């Protein structure tokens, strides 16, 4: 049987006047959660409190699916409340939670769920892993490769969330399960912690302080020491007994018969020595020194309208990016197709009349789309020079694969025409004459004609 020991702490921080974070520690149901509310007036406070209340009061099976259902119900509660009260319109909240649930094989599992940019970490075997993925603008841009880890760490809009409870009738919930082993520690926190305290410090604190309550208190203290620019909430859940699962797994690992303790962590992004999880936004935001000045203008402290405009801007930017990519892809395809048609249209030559003469055209007879044939070579062969068969042949727009072969054809045609014209001329000049006498040259250089008469 799995036994858990839990400690939690929350604080308004050093800048904000109210604490819009809420948390759940239900030892009876073994559900633990953190919610970070947003929205003007009292909206943020109400949203996070409503979500936690709904998460706790729902009745579902102790399974991962049951936990997801609780989150969906919590979303509906916040959304309906916001829709029905003009003062609370647009309020929303992040929500991350873990629960001890029945796994498919009947053994204990820790199920986790997440919406928004609060985080769930797991300390296992001396390593800190972030189980959840931040639903934030900066994380999206970083994952798309539009921001480096370094740029993301200091991005002025890194507090803008892209998913939250209460903004739509339905919500998409990230989820997962982990097999709990004795010594494991889960940390749920709002961004007021990890924007001030880097992952190395979080890891060191969890290692140093065994007691969950002491660890939670110390993490909140550290966040305040680093500025406390936001509300800070930490829930630390320690696995103090796993019913011998750890020993069994270790024995199996030693004998080579089973997957061992670490098999479950293979799918989880590990945090490296720089505190970067690889698949997740960097943990070193605060230590990078790029936090903006403390201000009530941060997204979580902003009015509802600002929040909506932020979300709209994020959606618009993503939409615009996708549309641009789509248009570029279409343009590329059309460009390639246009080039191919142009190449095909111009790769052919044909012979036809251009006015009264024979010419060689480049292009397809009749043209192709916008590509009309062009006269490439004009010849001196005239329509009137051709016989009927030749005229018909030229009218037939005979095509050629190259200019050279078209020239050969026209040259042959020209030769036939010349031959015919020569023959005609010869026939004309060899006709008998009775009017012109042959001339002779006399000595002395004078020329005289000697009349001749026919016999
Ligand atoms: Mg916050």
Image (cartoon, rainbow, N blue to C red):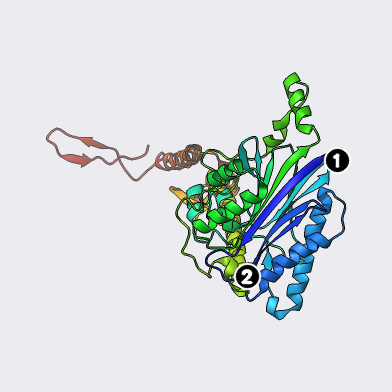
Query: Does residue 300 appear to the left or right of 406 in the view shown?
Result: right
Specify the quarter for ligand 1.
bottom right
Q: Is residue 211 visible?
A: yes
**Quadrant of the rendered structure where residue 78 is?**
bottom right
Q: Residue furthest left?
A: 444
Q: Residue furthest bottom?
A: 86
- From the top left corner, tell me how far across and down residue 318 is, in percent: 60, 59
- Residue at point 73% right, 58% down? 24
Residue 168 in picture, x, y percent from top left: 73, 66
Indicate which disc residue 438 carries.
Answer: none
- Which residue, given by chain and number where applicable, does mark 1 sit on? 104
Q: In terms of secondary structure, where does tag 1 sit?
A: loop
The crowd level at tag 1 (other Cα within 10 Å; few <14, some 14-19, many 20+) is few
Residue at the disc numbered 2: 308
Q: Position of residue 131 (x, y in %)?
A: 67, 46
Image height of 54 relative to 178, above or below: below
> Which of 352 and 225 lies nearest the eye of the viewer?
225
Q: Where is residue 294 drawn, in percent x and y? A: 49, 65
Snapshot quadrant of residue 446: top left
Q: Residue at x 67, y 39 (%)?
A: 268
Badge 2 element: helix
Considering depth in this image, is 237 or 391 the residue closer to the camera? 237
Q: Residue furthest top?
A: 255
Please tell me which of labels 2 and 1 falls first in the chain. 1
Instruction: Name the one closer to the observer, 46 or 326.
Output: 46
The residue lying at 75 percent from left, 75 percent from top is 83
Quarter of the figure that contains the C terminus: top left
Q: Quadrant of the N terminus?
A: top right
């Amino acid at each position: 049987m799995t036994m858990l020991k839990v400690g939690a702490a929350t604080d308004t921080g050093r800048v904000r006047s109210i604490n819009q974070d809420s948390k759940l520690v239900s030892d009876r149901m073994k559900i633990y959660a953190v919610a970070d509310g947003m929205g003007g007036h009292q909206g943020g406070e109400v949203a996070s409190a409503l979500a936690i209340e709904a998460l706790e009061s729902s009745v579902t099976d102790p399974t991962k699916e049951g936990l997801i259902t609780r989150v969906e119900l919590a979303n509906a509660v916040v959304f309906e409340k916001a829709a029905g009260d003009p003062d609370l319109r647009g309020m929303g909240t992040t929500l991350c939670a873990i629960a001890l649930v029945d796994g498919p094989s009947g053994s204990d599992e820790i199920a986790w769920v997440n919406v928004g940019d609060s985080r769930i970490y797991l300390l296992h075997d001396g390593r800190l892993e972030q189980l959840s993925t931040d639903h934030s603008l900066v994380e999206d841009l970083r994952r798309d490769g539009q921001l480096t880890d370094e740029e993301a760490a200091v991005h002025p809009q890194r507090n803008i969330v892209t998913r939250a409870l209460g903004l739509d009738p339905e919500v998409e919930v990230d989820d997962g399960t982990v097999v709990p082993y004795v010594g494991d520690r889960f940390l749920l926190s709002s961004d007021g912690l990890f924007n001030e305290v880097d992952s190395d410090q979080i890891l060191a604190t969890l290692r140093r302080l065994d007691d969950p309550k002491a660890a939670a208190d110390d993490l909140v203290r550290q966040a305040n020491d680093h500025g406390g620019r936001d509300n800070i909430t930490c829930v630390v859940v320690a696995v103090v007994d796993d019913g011998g699962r750890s020993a069994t797994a270790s024995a199996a690992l030693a004998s080579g018969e089973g997957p061992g303790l670490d098999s479950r962590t293979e799918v989880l992004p590990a945090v490296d020595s720089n505190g970067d999880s690889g698949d997740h936004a960097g943990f070193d935001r605060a230590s990078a020194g790029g936090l903006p000045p403390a201000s009530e203008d941060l997204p979580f402290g902003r009015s509802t309208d600002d929040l909506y405009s932020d979300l709209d801007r994020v959606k618009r930017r993503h939409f615009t990016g996708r549309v641009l990519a789509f248009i570029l892809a279409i343009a590329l395809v059309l460009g390639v197709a246009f080039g191919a048609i142009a190449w095909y249209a111009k790769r052919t030559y044909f012979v036809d009349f251009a006015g009264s003469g024979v010419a060689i055209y480049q292009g397809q007879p009749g043209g192709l789309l916008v590509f009309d044939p062009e006269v490439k070579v004009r010849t001196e062969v005239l329509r009137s020079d051709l016989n009927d068969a030749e005229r018909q042949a030229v009218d037939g727009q005979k095509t050629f694969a190259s200019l050279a072969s078209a020239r050969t054809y026209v040259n042959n045609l020209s030769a036939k025409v010349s031959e015919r014209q020569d023959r005609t001329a010869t026939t004309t000049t060899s006709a008998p004459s009775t009017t012109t006498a042959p001339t002779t040259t006399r000595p002395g250089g004078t020329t005289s004609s000697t009349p001749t008469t026919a016999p």
